[in-house]
């Protein structure tokens, strides 16, 4: 089975749950089975969230199918990528800590936006659903390192599953057999194709990822 066929197979599997959730909410709304306006608003919000997830999965799969990750190609200013990451993180309720100007350039494969989306998708795995998560970014040697920790630590079982998914012995992440989902799988594929790495840091409290960075001194 080719990578494209695998992506489509996983996409079909992953969209079933949010589509089912959206369908359930729509049936409640159309059947007038919600007793209060607040219940209706929650159902509408739940429908929108579920459909947004479907849309995001389809966009991520489409980007992969149109332009599969390969050797690092085009580059973008590192500061531009960081700025875009900050915007997308804010949209997901995750803050980005203060940082100085980021000099140099990053391999982005196709575009700064796509690289930023992949970075945020991976950081959001550790952020969880509770508000208050904080991400950081810092230059380190010839890399740019992002990290994200949740507002409250996850349980040992969650950390064990995440560690097993991200830090296998040979292939750090199996995109087709992981329980973390298609979006994370494709984001991981892109980051590693660009020469990056993803791991658990700080005794598993944070997820970190790095991308090679070139500066004018190199």
Image: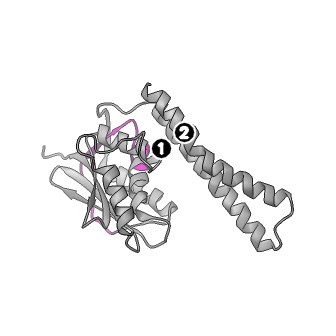
Count of marks, rendered view = 2
C-beta proximity under 8 Å, tags 2 and 1: yes
Disc marking residue 163: none
Q: Position of residue 51 (x, y in %)?
A: 65, 50
Q: Position of residue 190 (x, y in %)?
A: 36, 40
Q: Is residue 89 above or below residue 189?
A: below
Mark 2 vs 1, N-terminal side: 2
Quick check: 156 left or right of 144?
A: right
Single out the residue that lies furthest toward the left: 217
Q: Position of residue 56 (x, y in %)?
A: 55, 47
Res. 183 in view: yes
Find disc 2 in the rendering and name its residue.
11
Q: Nearer the viewer, residue 149 or 166?
A: 166
Res. 66 in view: no
Disc marking residue 182: 1
The quarter of the displayed image where residue 15 is located? top right
Q: Residue at x 37, y 72 (%)?
A: 153
Q: Is residue 156 above or below residue 216?
A: below
Q: Position of residue 22 (x, y in %)?
A: 69, 53
Which residues lie in the magenta part? Answer: 97-117
Q: Nearer the viewer, residue 169 or 26?
A: 169
Q: Residue at x 41, y 47 (%)?
A: 118
Q: Residue at x 32, y 52 (%)?
A: 164
Q: Nearer the viewer, residue 25 or 147?
A: 25
| The N terminus - image quarter | top left
The quarter of the displayed image where residue 16 is located? top right
Which structural element holds mark 2? Answer: helix
């Amino acid at each position: 089975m080719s990578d494209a066929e695998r992506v489509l197979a996983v996409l079909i599997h992953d969209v079933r749950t949010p589509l089912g959730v959206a369908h359930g909410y729509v049936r409640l709304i159309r059947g007038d089975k919600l007793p209060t306006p607040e219940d209706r608003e929650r159902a509408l919000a739940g429908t929108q969230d579920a459909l947004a997830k479907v849309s995001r999965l389809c966009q991520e799969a489409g980007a992969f199918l149109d332009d599969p990750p390969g050797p690092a190609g085009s580059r973008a200013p590192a500061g531009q990528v960081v700025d875009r990451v900050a915007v997308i993180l804010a949209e997901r309720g995750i803050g980005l800590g203060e940082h100085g100007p980021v000099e140099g350039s990053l391999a982005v494969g196709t575009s700064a936006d796509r690289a930023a989306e992949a970075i945020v998708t991976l950081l959001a795995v550790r952020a969880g659903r509770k508000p208050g998560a904080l991400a950081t970014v810092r230059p380190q040697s010839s890399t740019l390192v992002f990290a994200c920790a949740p507002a409250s630590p996850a349980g040992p079982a969650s950390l064990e599953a995440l560690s097993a998914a991200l830090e296998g012995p040979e292939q750090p992440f199996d995109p087709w057999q992981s329980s973390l989902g298609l979006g994370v799988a494709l984001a991981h594929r892109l980051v590693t194709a660009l020469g990056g790495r993803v791991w658990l840091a700080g005794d598993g409290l944070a997820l970190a990822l790095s991308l090679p960075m070139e500066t004018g001194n190199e």
